[in-house]
Image (cartoon, rainbow, N blue to C red):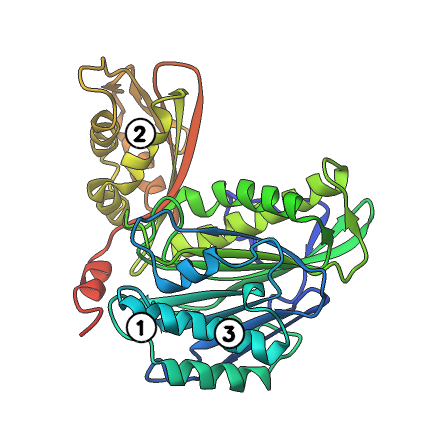
Amino acid sequence: MSEGFFRSRWTERPKHVSEAEPASLPQGFRAAGVAAGIKPEGLDLGLLVSEEPDTTSAARFTTNARVGAPVMVSRQADLRGLRAVVANSGCSNVGDGRRGLETATAMQARTAERLGLEPAQVGVASTGIIGQELPRDAVLSGIDAAMGELGERAEELSEAILTTDAAPKRACLDVKLPAGLVRLAAQAKGVAMISPRFATMFCFVETDALVDPDTLDLLTGVCVKRSFDRISVDGQLSTSDTVFALASGRSGVTVQPQSEDELRLGEAMDALLRQLALDMVADGEGCERVGRIVVRGGMEIVEPVARSVANSPLVKTALHGGDPNFGRILQAAGAAMPPGSHFVADLEIEGRQVVSAGDAVDLDDAEQSDLEAVVRRSEVDFALTLPGEGGEAEIFFSDLSEAYVSFNSKYTS
């Protein structure tokens, strides 16, 4: 793995992208983070604001049928023209009925009032324990305090949204477009309750490029599908997943639809979000290794097979132990295929073929020793080929450790 933000071999910094100081913000944005008293200690309320009246935005949320009050409120906002985001950690504001909904609405209203905006221009996000009351007075006082701390950097914002994360997840990139230089940044959190269609995660993306809302929505959707929709720690779909992308336009550089500028900005966003997604997997509670499974074959089977492998506790525990037990991968793959299917598959681990046409390949002692060594690396690559053509699915997943079980067995106690 390389140094810098793009640490994984599965991400690559585009040639027209350079890394800026990770906590920097694009032009036109301000941010803050404060200790509102939601958590016993530390920062727990963050605020992100665009100063530009014509800011455009896009959003994506969890697809869980059970969602938190902040997601309900944000879905009703002007998701093409958000000017601010208010977020807290320590309590997800899920399962608190009308009181919780009123608190999320109050967060939106107080932020709008203090900034001179309409409530619909404010997105809301909360993360933490489900089924507890989010203390409204503390949150509103925290919003007031954050207004006085707004600045041109995002350290406190990125720290205020953390729950069990080992460290903040943030980056800032300078992106050279044919039309000029723009900046792209993001702050994210996520470490567990991570499954396809996001995680218990937030990601707030900012750019000072001038991007129309349709283009920004397209780029956000495509990049989310290739990043946060491609990860698994424990196969659990959160109630609170939220991605907000805001474009201030302050740079004066216009990104025209279907242009080279759009392509290059999209490449930069794709790399940014994929690395942040991989950071979430690598930060999975107690995680020691990250796996990638790529499944190729018929279009109708590659996705369910890849997700079955990535979510399998047996596959994950083998990954944790550095055990090349590929029989678990075959079992998980077969379980996701239609009943009665004739199982034919080739499997490679780090480019070494271990299964041919569904049967194990004989390995000599040296080959077996080499296989055992490569599965002990921090990143392990698996490639599974099934019958059919035209389909390919990629999922990144963490191992499953004793530390994960221990932590989650006493998360609220």
- In the image, residue 284 above or below residue 379: below
Residue at the disc numbered 1: 99
How many numbered marks are there? 3
Mark closest to the chain's N terminus, 2 or 1: 1
Answer yes or no: is residue 164 visible: no
Image-based side of 44 in relation to 324, left or right: right
Image-based side of 14 in relation to 223, left or right: right
Q: Residues within 10 Å of mark 2 (few under 14, many from 20)?
A: many
Q: Amino acid at mark 1?
A: Arg
Q: Amino acid at mark 3?
A: Ala
Q: Residues within 10 Å of mark 1 (few under 14, many from 20)?
A: some
Residue toward you, 81 or 293: 81
Residue at the disc numbered 3: 109
Answer yes or no: is residue 180 visible: yes
Q: Are marks 3 and 2 in contact (CB under 8 Å)?
A: no
- In the image, residue 24 above or below residue 291: below
Q: What residue do we see at 59% from left, 80% from top?
A: 114
Occupied quadrant, residue 385:
top left
Mark closest to the chain's N terminus, 3 or 2: 3
Q: Amino acid at mark 2?
A: Val
Occupied quadrant, residue 324:
top left
